[in-house]
Image (spheres, rainbow, N blue to C red):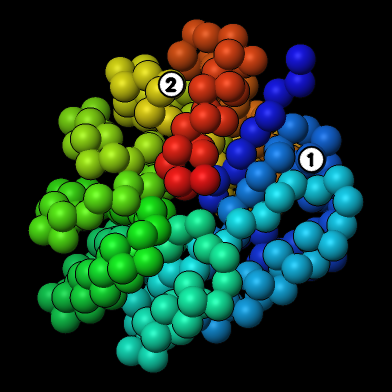
Amino acid sequence: MSITLFDTHTHFDVPDFDQDRLQLAALAKKMGVEHLVLIGFIAERFQNLIACQKQLQQQPDVPKVHLAPGLHPFYIEQHQAEHLQQVEQFLQRENCVAIGEIGLDTFLKVHKQPDLFAKQQHYFAVQLELAQQYQKPVLLHIRKSHAEVLKMLKQHRFKHGGIAHAFSGGVEEAKAFIQLGFKIGVTGQISNPNAKKLHTVVQTIGAQHLVLETDCPDMTPLCCQLDQHSRTRNTPANLIYVLEALAKSLNVQQQDLAQILWRNSFAALAL
């Protein structure tokens, strides 16, 4: 019985893949990836998301491609009010599975400055309202801001769930997101034995609350970093290695785990 996988978080539209996107998509399908999501981060790349989806959907034997437009908190300095209107226009014109990736990020000192953090919160709030209006789940980017993100989700009484992408919080935070209807996104980070916090989280909450993501071209699984050819770049084909590492961490069969994660992905994206 073959394994079927859903890459719930990719940036497969970025220029890193312009040379060999079709070959990599075919390889991903061969490795069991049946679906992938193209995630937005800045408005000027929204057209690239659509073009990438069109390019791939014309090909046989590649994963089915879904769209999720959003304004990423890390690029807050670039975002302008009209970009929020562009998110809404995107939702009106295209068939979108979610809004993402959106959230809060205080990893850099500059983003902790009150004015910039307030701008992040404003953009997050408006996009949460759009998700409510269009009844879409959200793909959350959260770095050093778990409590603040949870607080805003509760303030907005957000009911459509989604995925806490590339989860880096602790067990209690994971449980809080699950309680709000979110799945926890696991990347190639799980292949790192030193990512002890992440291993503790997945082992405590269990497979029923997890989904897989490559976050390509970032977050390359450890095993792929040792191969000179893929050192610089993660691709959707590497999702199988995220599954392998997660199965090992949870001490379960890959086949059984894949079936649970497959169902979780459809639930998280309301497909």
Residue 29 circle label: 1
Give the x, y percent position of residue 140.
36, 54
Quarter of the figure with residue 183: top left
Q: Secondary structure at mark 2?
A: helix
Q: Is residue 231 visible?
A: no
Residue found 33% across the figure and 89% down from its top: 81
Q: Where is mark 2, residue-wise?
A: 207
Q: Nearer the viewer, residue 161 or 71?
A: 161
Label 1 close to label 2 by CB (< 8 Å): no
Residue found 26% across the figure and 69% down from its top: 129
- Give the quarter of the figure containing the N terminus: top right
Q: Is residue 64 visible?
A: yes
Residue 11 circle label: none
266 left or right, relative to 223: left
Residue found 47% across the figure and 32% down from its top: 264
19 left or right, relative to 234: right
1 or 2: tag closer to the N-terminus: 1
